[in-house]
Amino acid sequence: MAECKKSCLAPASHPKVRLLVIHTGGTIGMVYHDEVLSPPGPNVFVKALRKLPNLHDKQYALDDSTSGPQENTLVLPLCKQNKRIVYTVLEYSPLLDSCNMTTDDWATIGKDIEKHYEKYDGFVILHGTDTMAYTASALSFMCEHLGKPVILTGSQVPIYEMRNDGIDNLLGALLIAGQFVIPEVCLYFHNKLYRGNRVTKVDSGSFNAFNSPNLVPLGNAEVDIKINWDTVWRANTTSPFRVSTQMNRNVGLLRLFPGITAMTVKSFLQAPMDGIVLETYGSGNAPDNCADLLEEFRNATERGVIMVNCTQCLRGSVTTSYATGKALSDAGLVAGCDMTSEAALCKLSYVLARTDLSIEAKRKMLSQNLRGEMMADLQGAKLTLSDSRFIQVIAKSLSISCKEELEAVLDALTPNLACADRRLGGLGCHKGDGEEQLQKYNMSYSHHIPNVEYTEFSACPKES
């Protein structure tokens, strides 16, 4: 990777970016013992990094009193943006195989991010690949009002091996977190930066282990690192960062298969189950000729169990185009649109833990795009001034990401739009039913919309 270069300038000549690397475990830092991969002793990983010139500028660290003497703190060679990326490694004890990860471990990672949030400019999380997509999805929901990059990475081969992918993955994650303000939970692997809640592991034997089936990568690290800024998620909020560590563990994944019985479904949906992700055929279909099967789904809905319908296909979205898909919708399932099963399960766990919400409010929240995890089902959606979505689309197209910019757009556009709406019989200025007149102004849209607030404006001049 051509992003770092040596410099003979004094240590104080360049701005510094400080990152926290949270080493939870995983293959990237494991060593072979009796032909079995297992975690090494304490701080072995950091000692190995110090010997790698691409990951630690030894001479600079010796000359710089703020970087050199600190244990577990390293510094990259000078980067293209003339920044020094200084990173501190926080190593968990014991280091975890990702197969052993639980919601408690997600909470621990989240709390560490929250604890050190003000001190560092970004975060890199080293994690095993087997459940990395789950952790990335969970953290994307747990980290509320995120304004700094959080990037998960790992490797298929330990960094101690002659041929490995760990060094490039770690270096790439550090360079992106240190040079670009991407306020998302991401996953970096094999030269690609993905949105964390959009990925799934697709290959256990390749360096190209992850894929984002329904969303293009946020960035690519080739000769240069290029960020697809149009795709980066921006939360339109000025609220302070916080981590919600409450996750409901009474959730599960149920995959449909030919011949599945109503008794199997009934057993799976028994208490204490609060919610499930149902992996269905094609575009969200299930047998509609098995009345007893559909009855179990209806009974579960009536008991307050929330079910999310996700497709078993790697790509595509859940729709109600087929009768077999509409049957599940009629039974009370929430459409998961194009969410991965990992994202849907973590979102379900996050939403169900909200004790301040009613069942109906939770169902509505699950159908909303919270962190860019889904392309919301907008079939038949209309843009009208009365429900604010017209303003939302404009905000999205202008990449508005702060309250002040939004207020400026509202001040400039709302009076004219409100008056036009009134002349056409819209709902913004009087009670008349103007739906027929507004048809030519209605537009369907298919991109995620920022969460913006709409202010009522009724000061229209009288018609002559």
Image (cartoon, rainbow, N blue to C red):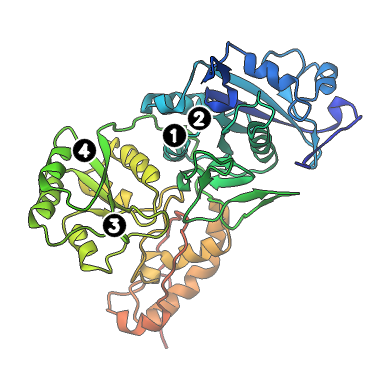
Instruction: Point out the tag, 2 or 3, that comes first from the N-terminus.
Output: 2
Residue matched to label 2: 128
Question: Which of the two marks, 1 or 4, is nearer to us in this view?
Answer: 1
Instruction: Point out the tag, 4 or 2, that comes first from the N-terminus.
Output: 2
Does residue 170 appear left or right of residue 3 in this picture?
Answer: left
**Element at label 2:** loop
Residue beneath the point at 34% across and 41% down: 345
Question: Which of the two marks, 1 or 3, is nearer to us in this view?
Answer: 3
Residue matched to label 3: 281
Separation of residues labelled 2 and 1 (CA atoms) = 7 Å
Three-letter residue code for mark 1: Thr
CB under 8 Å between discs 4 and 2:
no
Residue matched to label 1: 131
Given residues 93 and 463, the one toward you in this image is 93
Q: Is residue 272 above or below residue 364?
A: above
Three-letter residue code for mark 4: Asp
Three-letter residue code for mark 2: Gly
- Camera sees residue 18: yes
CB under 8 Å between discs 1 and 4:
no
Separation of residues labelled 1 and 4 (CA atoms) = 22 Å
* Mark sitting on residue 274: 4
Does residue 353 appear left or right of residue 453 in this picture?
Answer: left
Q: Position of residue 215 (x, y in %)?
A: 50, 55
Q: Position of residue 418 (x, y in %)?
A: 43, 73
Image quarter hosting the C terminus = bottom left
**Element at label 1:** loop
- Camera sees residue 116: no
Residue beneath the point at 17% across and 39% down: 268
The image quarter in which residue 45 lies: top right
